Image (cartoon, rainbow, N blue to C red):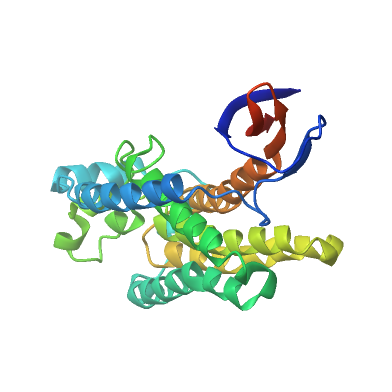
Amino acid sequence: MRLFWFLLMAMGFPTASLLAQTANDTSGIYHVNLLVSGGVALAGTYTNIVGLPKVKDKDRLSEPELEQLLQAGVSRFNQPGLTQDPAKREQAHQVSDFLMYGTAAMPLLLFLDGKVRKDYLDVALMYFETVALTSNMYTYSPLGPTFIDRYRPLAFYEEVPLDERQSGNMRNSFYSGHVATTAMGGFFLAKVLHDYHPEWGSRRWLLFGAASLPTATVAWLRVRALKHFPTDVIAGSLIGAGMGILIPELHRKLQTRMKVQAGFGLQGNTVGVIWAF
């Protein structure tokens, strides 16, 4: 089905043809509107800066609350979160930070690719938009810690200093923002390369397998750091990978569905936009 969305402008056009001539809106793979995507990126950055401190500033845990945690325990699937070595948690935390920031920066490597480099502004803006939306998904969505209180594994370890276990941040186990950010960066990189290189054929799908490696590593480290349970890192992986793939795919769909159409009308030559679906 094709629906004529709206007429962009009326202008002179050097042709007397009665037939419509259709061409792509841009020459790139994605359709990125500077104002819309830029606005989303800037607004999302601001709202995340405002909202994230509130997520971390939850009420401290009381000693009776900690005692109830120990009595309640966790599910069998999440049990690995309670069988780690607390002495190794800081090292695991530091390495997970390094891998998260490194993977989130990996999409910069896209600009070494000649095909992507010609559309560097579109791709860069689209990535900033993806980062902003992924961050706000953690900070504001019903799936994140603003609405869900789940105690971190660290709160269950009696050998850890009491003051550390009572931190309000111990309520933010679900879901893992570190894993979501890592997955977002890796899968965004894989998705863009996949879209720009159809000549790679079925080998393109190996890109997504490669993107899962840093995601899985950070997920394991976050459990080892006593920050998250297995279900927390699985949810973070799915959300981050989903955002890294979905946002470019939406922009790609916009590119294939929006077309410029020119032709001759009663009021003169016209140019309009066709929205196809």
Q: Residue at x 42, y 54 (%)?
A: 176
Measured from the top left, where is residue 75 in percent x and y? 47, 43
Q: Nearer the viewer, residue 90 or 75?
A: 90
**Residue 258 in which image quadrant:** top right
Q: Residue at x 35, y 55 (%)?
A: 153
Measured from the top left, where is residue 23 in percent x and y? 74, 45
Q: Is residue 175 visible?
A: no
Q: Is residue 269 above or below residue 43?
A: above
Q: Is residue 195 above or below residue 268?
A: below
Q: Is residue 110 above or below residue 235?
A: below
Q: Nearer the viewer, residue 258 or 225?
A: 258
Q: Nearer the viewer, residue 121 or 104?
A: 121
Q: Is residue 124 left or right of residue 43?
A: right
Measured from the top left, where is residue 249 in percent x and y? 63, 47
Measured from the top left, where is residue 262 in percent x and y? 71, 36
Q: Quadrant of the N terminus?
A: top right
Q: Residue at x 84, y 65 (%)?
A: 199
